[in-house]
Image: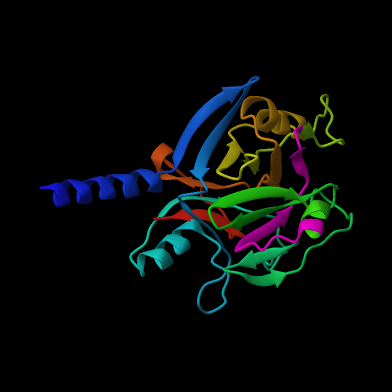
């Protein structure tokens, strides 16, 4: 009987740890979908190519691939900017293999609006790290994707964000806690400014660092809130595997 109870408890703990908490919120007049991942206990990964080196591109294709090994996808989001062939614009590491180096210099578009940053997944933690700090620390990431701009840097909004900006898009990104245990993924449900989006991570979610993934092409897979956004092929995808 004791063994049976212990087994039941282990199954409950495993299933509890696998659940990704997602929900819809409203903050400062804007609507968002928010998914929080327990980076210390959940299997958070990046995905780009299949076994034949073809770009995966769609949540449905990724789900099919995982199903072949008895796994499933409980959450996913596009995770970083990419070229027309879906290759990463900046640093990209998957399963400890680097596909693209770190790009430290300024450039055109949102990616080059320094400071930008890198989302780094390591053993039992995940961190958003500003690119120049990342180069100094040189952490060994099991998975990593570079994007930009940073939304929040050590508790401060990106210096180029304007409260009265008129540039509004549906946007998505990720913020992490100081201890790396929480990774909070957000996609806006209406068009928002960078200032709106960064303020959500800093002031409402209370996260010291946050990174912009993309805008206008932002996509979310979150079955717990009935989200499976359709669209054309994506580049890097971040997801939680059960």
Magenta segment? 136-155
Q: Hey, which residue is sitting farthest left in the picture? A: 1
Query: Would you say residue 235 is visible in this rendering?
Result: no
> Which residue is painted at 68% across and 64% down in the image?
92
136 left or right of 218 in image:
right
Tell me residue 90's x, y (percent).
75, 61
Q: In this figure, what is the number of numbered marks? A: 0
Tell me residue 72's x, y (percent).
38, 58
Query: Would you say residue 104 is visible in this rendering?
Result: yes
Q: Hey, which residue is sitting farthest bottom in the picture? A: 52
In front here: 222 or 145?
145
> Which residue is painted at 56% across and 55% down in the image?
238
33 left or right of 7 in image:
right
Quadrant of the image occupied by residue 198: top right
In front here: 186 or 166?
186
Membership of 79 in magenta stretch: no
Q: Hey, which residue is sitting farthest top in the picture? A: 29
Q: Quadrant of the C terminus?
A: bottom left
Above or below 232: residue 155: above
In front here: 145 or 108?
145
158 left or right of 234 in image:
right
> Which residue is painted at 82% across and 62% down in the image?
103
């Amino acid at each position: 009987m004791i063994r049976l109870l212990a087994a039941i408890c282990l199954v409950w703990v495993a299933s509890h740890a696998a659940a990704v908490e997602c929900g819809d919120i409203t903050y400062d007049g804007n609507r968002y979908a928010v998914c929080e991942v327990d980076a210390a206990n959940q299997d958070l990964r990046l995905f780009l190519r299949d076994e034949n080196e073809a770009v995966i591109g769609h949540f449905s294709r990724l789900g099919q691939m995982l199903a072949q090994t008895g796994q499933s996808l409980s959450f996913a989001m596009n995770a970083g900017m990419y070229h027309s062939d879906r290759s990463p614009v900046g640093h990209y590491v998957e399963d400890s293999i680097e596909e693209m180096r770190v790009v430290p210099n300024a450039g055109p578009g949102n990616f080059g609006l320094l400071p930008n940053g890198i989302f780094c997944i390591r053993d039992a933690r995940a961190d958003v790290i500003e690119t120049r700090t990342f180069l100094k620390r040189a952490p060994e990431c099991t998975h990593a994707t570079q994007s930009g701009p940073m939304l929040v840097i050590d508790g401060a909004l990106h210096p180029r964000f304007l409260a009265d900006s008129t540039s509004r898009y549906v946007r998505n990104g990720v913020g992490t806690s100081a201890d790396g245990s929480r990774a909070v993924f957000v996609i806006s449900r209406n068009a928002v400014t960078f200032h709106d989006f960064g303020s959500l991570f800093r002031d409402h979610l209370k996260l010291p660092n946050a990174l912009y993934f993309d805008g206008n092409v932002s996509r979310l897979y979150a079955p717990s809130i009935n989200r499976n956004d359709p669209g054309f092929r994506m580049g890097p995808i971040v997801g939680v595997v059960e």
